[in-house]
Image (cartoon, rainbow, N blue to C red):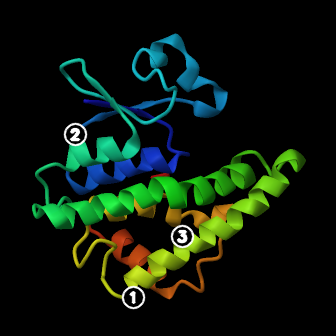
């Protein structure tokens, strides 16, 4: 299989990380999203939504949306609970990541790190801080109760939220007050098959 992505993206990193944790063999195909790589006709044929990552299966099928790819790759693995309610809790955190976390933390990071904080986006950047800290507070509260977000074992929920949380500082979010998040980040980074975002 092939994964089309750009490693500046946390959404793409999720796929790289789960593939490493589960020893999934794949070919990584770089798509330069900063220079229009996701808008070419060749890429749009794979994902008309012009977003990375995209998973290309050997049989010619394509799958987009990072958490959908993540869950597909992790199906029947230890990273997805077999119990229906436990799996629903995993999905709950993945939906939280897409709607209450990523729109704040990832966007603030993009404005600051990759756009260099243009004047036209400074107000937007500032507005993202409140929502980002709200998300981090909720995560920290949960991680005071359980070792991982959906319980006491590592799941795809953790991979979904680890991707942008561990680089939240690049978006101006100081993680020092979030002691439970810091413990959780360290726990994931110490996994024997962990791979970093830029490694």
Asked which secondary structure carries label 2, the reply is loop
Q: Is mark 3 on a helix, strand or loop?
A: helix
State the CA–CA distance, disc 1 to disc 2.
Answer: 35 Å
Looking at the picture, does residue 112 appear above or below residue 150? above
In the displayed structure, would residue 1 be above or below residue 24? above
> Who's the residue at 83% across and 56% down the image?
123
The quadrant where residue 143 appears = bottom left
In the picture, the quarter occupied by the N terminus is top left
Q: In this view, does 174 lie above or below 157?
A: below
The local secondary structure at tag 1 comes to: loop
Mark in front: 2 vs 3? 3
Residue toward you, 82 or 85: 85
Compare residues 191 and 74 and report the one nearer the observer.
74
Residues marked 1 and 2 touching at CB (< 8 Å): no
Dots 3, 1 in contact, CB < 8 A: no
Find disc 2 in the rendering and name its residue.
Answer: 25
Q: Which residue is drawn at 29% across and 71% down?
A: 150
Q: Label 2 to label 3, Cα distance in Å?
A: 33 Å
User: Residue at 78% of width from left, 62% of height from top?
Assistant: 126
Q: Could you tell which of marks 2 and 3 lies nearer the N-terminus?
A: 2
The residue identified by callout 3 is 135
Q: Can residue 46 be seen in this view?
A: yes
Question: Is 47 placed left or right of 39 in the picture?
Answer: left
Give the camera-side residue of 43 and 199.
Answer: 43
Q: Residue at x 39, y 88 (%)?
A: 144
Q: Which is more toward the observer, 182 or 127?
A: 127
Classed neighbour count for the residue bearing mark 2: other residues with Cα under 10 Å, few (<14), some (14–19), many (≥20): few
N-terminal label among 1 and 2: 2
Numbered circle sitting on residue 144: 1
Give the distance between the C-alpha atoms of the residues marked 3 and 1, in whole angstroms: 14 Å
Image location (x, y in percent) of residue 177: 59, 86
Marks 1, 2: nearer the viewer: 1
């Amino acid at each position: 299989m092939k994964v089309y992505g750009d490693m500046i993206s946390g959404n793409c990193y999720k796929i790289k990380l789960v593939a490493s944790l589960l020893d999934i063999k794949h070919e990584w195909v770089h798509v330069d999203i900063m220079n229009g790589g996701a808008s070419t006709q060749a890429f749009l044929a794979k994902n008309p939504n012009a977003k990375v990552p995209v998973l290309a299966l050997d049989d010619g099928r394509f799958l987009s949306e990072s958490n959908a790819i993540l869950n597909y790759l992790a199906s029947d693995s230890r990273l997805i609970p077999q119990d229906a309610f436990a799996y629903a809790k995993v999905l709950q955190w993945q939906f939280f990541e897409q709607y209450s976390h990523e729109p704040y933390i990832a966007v603030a990071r993009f404005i600051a790190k990759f756009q260099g904080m243009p004047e036209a986006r400074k107000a937007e950047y500032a507005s993202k801080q409140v929502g980002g800290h709200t998300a981090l507070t909720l995560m920290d509260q949960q991680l005071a109760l359980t070792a991982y977000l959906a319980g006491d074992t590592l799941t795809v929920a953790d991979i979904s939220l680890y991707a942008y949380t561990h680089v939240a500082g690049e978006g101006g979010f100081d993680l020092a007050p979030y002691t439970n998040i810091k413990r959780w980040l360290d726990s994931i980074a110490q996994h024997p098959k962990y791979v970093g975002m830029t490694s």
